[in-house]
Image (cartoon, helix red, strand yellow):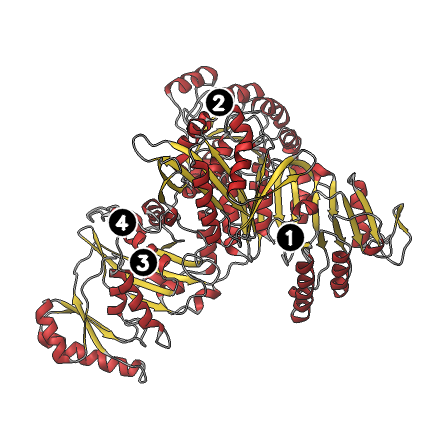
Amino acid sequence: MGLYHLEKMFDPRSVAVVGASPTQGSIGHAVVKNLLEGGYEGKIVPVNPKHSDIEGLRCHKAVSETEDHLDMAVIATPIAGVPDLVRECVEAGVESAVILSAGGKETGEKGRKIEEEIDGIARKGGLRILGPNCMGIIRPGKKLNASFAARMPYRGKLAFISQSGAVCSAMLDLSLKERMGFSYFVSIGSMLDVDFGDLIDYLGHDPDVKSILLYIESLTNIRKFMSAAREVSRVKPIIVLKAGKSAAGARAAASHTGAMAGEDAVYDAAFRRAGIARVRNLEDFFDCAELLAKQAPPKGPRIVVLTNSGGPGVMAADAVAEYGLELSSLGEETMRSLDEMLPPFWSRGNPIDILGDAGPERYAEVAGCCFEHEDTDGMLVILNLQAMTDPTEVAMAMAETLKDRPYPVFAAWMGGEGVEEGIEILNQAGIPTYGTPERAVRSFMYLYHYSRNMEMLQEIPSRLPRGMEPDEEQAGKIVGLGLKREKGVLTEVESKNLLSSYGVSVNRTEPAGSIEEALRLAREIGYPLVMKIHSTEITHKTEAGGVKVGLRSDDDLRRAFEEIMESARAYDPDAAVEGVSLQPMIENPDAEILLGAKRDRSFGPVILFGMGGIYAEILGDRALGLPPLNQNLARRLMEGTRVFRILKGYRNRPAADLELLEQMLVNLSHLLVDFPEIAELDMNPVIVKEGRPLAVDARVMVNPAKAPSPQHLVIGPYPEQYESREVTRDGMDIDVRPIKPEDAPLLLDLFESMSKKSRYYRFFTPLKTLSRDMLVRLTQVDYDRHIALVALQRDGEEIMLGVARVISDPDRNRAEFSVAVGDPWQGRGIGRKLLERALEVARDYGIKKIQGEVLRENEEMLGLGREMGFEIRRDGDAGDYLLTVDLGKNHG
């Protein structure tokens, strides 16, 4: 149900505790006690028919008997009675509920039916639900502890959401020890209603949230999750620990691609594309949480390491190399400064070994020198407990020196009891501390990956690249053939024709139903040849003895034909065999790679790239990506494999034409975008010879699609179908198209062209500048929910004249609109034309109702609303207006 009523859950004015209890150790008692001890300033209403008061508060017999309106109910009763309690909440007008009760779908069919009953009642009544089977909600800044957690965490800017109560407890305990602060601490439970996508959306718009941590065991609405994450991660780091790795999906696959594209690897690809950094274990999760809670993400991979011992410095350097980071180079000026302040035997490089007798003054002086050095993105300070060094005094000096630095600073205080006091000092100063250099560097690496993933979010592939003209009709006919077959398998010839229709390079392959036809084709194509079995029912040709290579004569051909037919009968006597296929043999290839695709049940089509040939599955060198792709994303996909090093050229092997390989991946991506019926696709091997890639084997399996294009994708392509040429009512020619990330400079110019009054009408505040975060939000939009159309001057210099936006809730039920036109172009019909086009797009999206708030002074917008048939009414005491249009009705 999107974001509806979530504010009542996270900022309630009143909370009912249903199942409240005076019994020490019960959940109902813990929730009431936590609300009271946390200092919650709203109304607390215990509900339990067995008691008259609890903790000095009057206890009500039922929710329906409370006198006041209730924003939220926390339900702490056995789950069997929860449906009736939810119905009671709905009837009493309660707007949100946190169900702590366990015993739902995690226990089996009986529990699942109870959850379904709860869901039906809540949805019908518009009641938002968190849980069931959760620990509850904590908001330190609001003094709200609506949970049975033992303590309230410190206040901070980090939001934490977890499906596991045990992980919540562990994170809470660690946060208190390390002095990490949170703005939200949410146990999400079984996600009957409110899910990760809803919470990411909600938290993304809260200025009290700087970063988001997610512990995920499963995802429900994948498309909503991806859309929310891609929107929010552009401005706020999202770190995820995904548990429950499984290859179950791969075991049922019929192709190399299917077998290799395991479920967990798809999550990896999706998280990268959503701008999320994924950590691998609980230790890394906690370490990243501490770094995010105290420092900003790094802008690059370069680290300077400061240490009082050579060994830990080497450990840090090894970790930097292992995790693909860089040691900052020390410039000549920095080296001269360090020579002046350090003993002669210092390491004269990075890591900077300031020697075992280093005291607090030396640590502080060297750190200060390094801060003047611009070619670095982070600093790791290591202290190894030694007789000549007081870790507490060094910590005190560093706490002051490391404060308010422009890049992340973190520390590894190595030792036991002797360093504990120093660690506490650093924690209080907001400096993350780790037990080993490796853990510190690994945390930095994860946050650097987040920064790298931001680059992927800027890539907005179009549905088709410029100049590409696929034969969609031909491709559709071939896919249709497969859909008529029981298993949906296309022959190699059909598969290659399908790929070729979208510009994927394949070698010539001809079918032959008899030995005579094979001999005729052989003379036409020319030797040497490869012969393969031609059958829709024998999937893996090599395993069936259905491939013969190096055929150089008619005798070779006859012998190969007989052997293939005999092997096929032995492999599967019942399989239908149409004959063989012949293709030119490419000898001594420079490389063999695998390109493929598989339709994942949750994420839609997934593209695979990796080492090819008969050992593809054994070597497991592959990377996964989600369509749509452009050439930059295709290059990033290839860079994730070891075979990429070979493709760049290695020793006596020539380099592949990487641009052609990128284009092959892009063309494959567009085929998958246009045809959701493709279930599995293999090109193995794709041979690279003299730099050029060529698919010499291909196999495609199709079956009916559950959703039309592009709804089968979890990442929508750039909606180029909404590009148009328009003429305004006063005859001005303009280009209208969806906004792109690279429009940021044009949007800034548009903002500068707007007067103070125009800015106030658009932003409801006298905004002087657009912050970086605002600029990112306004130009790097998720097209799934954010329609932003710009009007551009058609002739001459590219100038942005205006913008219209329609931003929907995640479920596309309702949306808000806004229009802004630069002052030099106002009154020429640009705003009307933009809004008309935006409403047309909104109709395509299935949005039913659109509304926008308009200041009462904004007579031009009010007039436009009347002209276009908007319903106009006063909104609240301020006297401003709410403009609403029902897209199910006609408007002018």
Q: Is residue 290 above or below residue 493?
A: above
> Do the residues under discs 2 and 4 have CB atoms within 8 angstroms?
no
Provide residue 340's location: percent of width, then percent of height: 44, 14
Which numbered disc, 1 or 3, marks the residue that appears first in the sequence?
A: 1
**Residues at marks 3 and 2, CA–CA distance in whole angstroms:** 46 Å
Residue on which the image places disc 2: 371
Residue on which the image places disc 1: 188
Q: Amino acid at mark 2?
A: Phe
Q: Is residue 684 above or below residue 72?
A: below
Question: Which residue is located at x 43 percent, y 45 percent?
Answer: 837
Residue at disc 4, secondary structure:
helix
- Label placed on residue 595: 3
**Residues at marks 1 and 2, CA–CA distance in whole angstroms:** 42 Å
Residue on which the image places disc 4: 646
Q: Amino acid at mark 1?
A: Ile
Which numbered disc, 3 or 2, marks the residue that appears first in the sequence?
A: 2
